[in-house]
Structures are given as structure tokens and as C-alpha cells.
Image: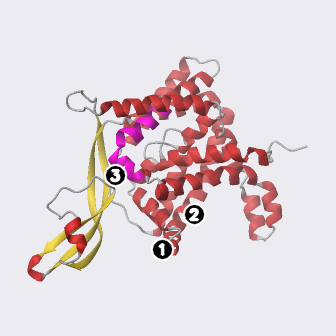
Amino acid sequence: MKSEHEDSTRMKEFPMLWLKGFLMGSADVVPGVSGGTMALILGIYERLLSAIKSVNTSVIKDVLRLKWLRALKQIHVFFLVMLFSGIVTALAFFTKVVPLQIYMFTAPEIVFGLFFGLIVGSIYILIKAIQQPNLSMCGWILIGTGIGLWVVQLVPTETPEHPLFVLLSGIIAITAMILPGISGSYLLLIMRKYDYVLSAIAKIGGSETMDGLVELAPFILGAVIGLALFSRVLSWLLDRYHRATLSVLIGFLLGSLLVIWPFQQREYVEQVRAEEVISLDDPRVASLPTIEEPAPLLPEYERVVLQAQQGQATLQTVKRKLIHSTPFWPKAPEYPDRWMGFVSMFVGLLLVTGLERLR
């Protein structure tokens, strides 16, 4: 008979766990949305925490002693492999096949509207799941909402790309990613490491695979450390103060709605990441915008700086990063395409109904 601490996952669960992992990974790509939120919606949140907790000091000692089979028997291997295969697939899909970071610039109403609807629907589901609600629950929700609002209004600042800071970013981001309502991607934006991590992931599989892996290594190590520590804290809170903890998490979700609202005045900062001297006869000179012309609304683009006197030009690769956003209510005459955001929100609400059936 299996202990409650052992992995009870069966191979027949693979398609469903893979799908849930894919949905979690999709949520983690969007700043403002938490993979932990999706895990709560899908009904695997506490199971995920238990699986992460199964990687303990005893397992690490066995690995260091090369007793790998013994170590594997203590870990919820099947559950973690099935779930994280979906997460990794989503990260690859939304950075290589369907670049979600680009659609966040070109169609923000659709992307953020969809997740806004998902979160509103999930809040309703979670409140419904709390048994015997009382006045104290409202107090905890208000506390969680206050913390959530404070986090999402933090202003990004310039930060170094030193491996130690990337490691710290991994610890903080993964902690937020498993915490519903607090987005790990958004905290990466605040720490100016969102584009850094996505760019490193995008390099894997091509000629720059090794560079990408080297850049990601400190982040991955930080993520492992953060998972090991914070999952135990959360699990302890849920075991002893389940209703209060869940109420605070609902508050986090409510607070996150401010930054997920699809209609925002967004401010960006541009940084030149690379430069290349080219001839004025290069066909790119005619096809790309100059520094004086309007730039395309993309997270990364190329532009040309003409140097006619020297008979050459400088090709610049420019990164655009979000530094601040202010929500507003779209008015019909000034915002004729507002319906796109509202329709997307409604689709998100409908998706929650379907996702709840996956619980």
C-alpha cells in the first residue's frame, strides 16, 4: 500500500497532466499572470506543492552519493515529468512558434483580455470552493488584495546581468510563479530580466544554443532553490491555515487584475542591444525605418542610422521594454476597437468553465 507521500500518478494521466502543464506554462509567459493561478483553477495546486516537496535533503544526499534509483523512488517523478513537459512545451511554443511576447505588443487587448477573463472566472471558482465563508475571510482577502496591488504597481528599474543577480531573479520569479495572483513574469519585468530570460530560451535549438544555456543556468539554479524553499512554506500554511491562506491568494488575484486589464496606456523604454556597420547600398537601408521615423510596435526591431557623409549606415537592434502602464476605460469614439478586449474577456470566462471540468 502506497504512503500518502509517494507518487500515485499513473501513465494514463499523462495527456491531462501534460495539458494542465501546457496551460500553466502559457500563463507564465504573460506578465501579470501566474502559473500558480492556473494550477489553482485546474485543481492541482496542492498536489504540485506536494510533488515539489518530495525533492528533499535526503534525495539530494542520495544523488550526491550516486544512489540515483533510491533518490528517484522518493520523488514524485511521474507527476513532475508529465506536468513540466507541458510547461516546457508551452514556453517553447510561445517563444518560437507563436511569439506571445510579440502579440502582447501588437494585440494587447486580445491577449490581456483573455487572461483577465480567466482570472475573474477563477476568483469566482475559488470563492465558491471555500467552505463556510465568514467575515474573517473578507479581511484576509482585503489583505491579499492590498499586497497584490502594491506588487503590480512597482516600477521596473535597471538591473545588472551578473550571474548572481540572475540567480536571485530565478528565486524570486519561481516563488511568484507558484504563488497564485503574483506573476513571476511581471516580477521579472520589474527586475528587468523578462526579455533576458525569453531571449535566452529563444536561442536554444539554434546556433546559439550553448550561449542560451549558459545564460539560463543561474536562473534555473535559482528557480530550483526557490521551489525547494517556498513550496514548503506554502504547503505548511495550506495545511494549518487553509481558509485564511486561500483567502489571501484570492486577494492576490484581485490585486493582479489592475495590471491585466487589457486597456492600458503603456510606456516603454528602448535600448540598443547591438550595432552593425553596413553599406548604404545594402537593401536593408531602404526596407528598415530610420531613427527619425516611427518605429514598429514590437518588443525588438531593427532600424538604420544613416551616415551619408561616410557612405555607410549603422544597423541597430533595439529592444523595447515595458516600464509603466496606466489602466483606462475605453470610450467608443476614441477607441473603436474596444470590443476586441471585451470579447476576449468573455472568451476567457467561457474557458474557465471548460478548465474547471479538467479539475
Q: Is residue 119 above or below residue 36?
A: above
Q: Nearer the viewer, mark 2 or mark 1?
A: 1
Residue under the point 41% across and 41% down:
111
Element type where label 2 sits in the image: helix
Say whether residue 12 is magenta. Answer: no
Specify the quadrant that holds the N terminus: top right
The answer to whether the residue labelled 1 contacts the one labelled 3, judged by CB atoms less than 8 Å apart, is: no
Q: Which mark is residue 197?
A: none
Mark 1 crowdedness (10 Å alpha carbons): few <14, some 14-19, many ≥20: few
* SS assignment for the magenta stretch, majority: helix
Task: Kindly identify which numbered label has been placed on residue 208.
Answer: 1
Region of the chain picked out in magenta, as a range = 101-118
Is 113 magenta? The answer is yes
| Callout 1 amino acid | Glu
Residue neighbourhood size for the residue with mark 2, other residues' Cα within 10 Å, grouped as few (<14), some (14–19), many (≥20): some
State the CA–CA distance, disc 2 to disc 3. Answer: 23 Å
Colour mode of the rendering: secondary structure
Residue annotated with mark 2: 221
Mark 1: secondary structure: loop
Q: Residue visible at 23% across and 66% down?
A: 287
Q: Is residue 199 left or right of residue 134?
A: left
